[in-house]
Image (spheres, grey):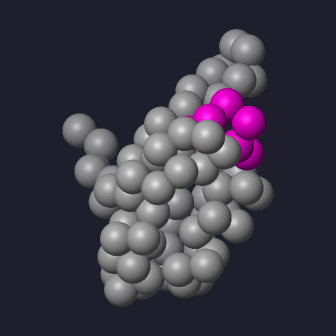
C-alpha cells in the first residue's frame, strides 16, 4: 500500500520532476506533484509525493525533513487525509 507525503516550504523553482528525483533516492516514487495556483500557474510552495510503501516513506521523512533543497529547508511529513 502506498503512503502519501506532504512536502512544504518548497522553493519556487522546484517542479514535479525535481520533486520526484529528490525522493527517488529513498525508494520508489509512485507520483510527485507540486501544487500550483490555478490562475497564475505558479507554485504554491508545497506538494505531495506518493511512495510505493511505508518503509520507503519513513526513510524519506527521516532523511529529507529539514534538509535543504535549492536553498530552502523543506518540511516532509505523512500527509493528513482531507477533511
Q: Nearer the viewer, residue 34 or 14?
A: 14
- Identify the residue shown where x is 46% and y is 46%: 74
Quarter of the rendering containing residue 31 = bottom right
Q: Is residue 23 magenta?
A: no
Q: In this view, which residue lies farthest toward the left?
A: 83
Residue 51: give x, y in percent of width and height.
49, 74
The answer to whether one can see residue 22 in this image is yes
Magenta highlight range: 10-15
* Magenta-colored segment: predominant secondary structure: loop
Q: In this view, which residue lies farthest toward the top?
A: 39
Q: Is residue 66 above or below residue 38?
A: below
- Identify the residue shown where x is 61% and y is 40%: 71
Q: Nearer the viewer, residue 69 or 60?
A: 69
Residue 53: give x, y in percent of width and height.
42, 84
Left or right: 5 in relation to 23: left
- Identify the residue shown where x is 38% and y is 57%: 65
Amino acid at each position: 500500500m502506498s503512503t502519501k507525503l506532504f512536502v512544504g516550504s518548497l522553493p519556487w523553482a522546484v517542479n514535479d520532476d525535481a520533486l520526484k528525483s529528490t525522493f527517488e533516492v529513498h525508494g520508489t516514487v509512485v507520483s510527485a506533484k507540486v501544487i500550483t495556483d490555478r490562475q497564475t500557474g505558479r507554485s504554491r510552495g508545497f506538494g505531495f509525493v506518493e511512495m510505493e510503501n511505508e518503509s520507503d516513506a519513513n526513510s524519506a521523512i527521516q532523511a529529507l525533513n529539514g534538509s535543504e533543497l535549492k536553498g530552502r529547508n523543506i518540511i516532509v511529513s505523512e500527509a493528513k487525509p482531507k477533511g
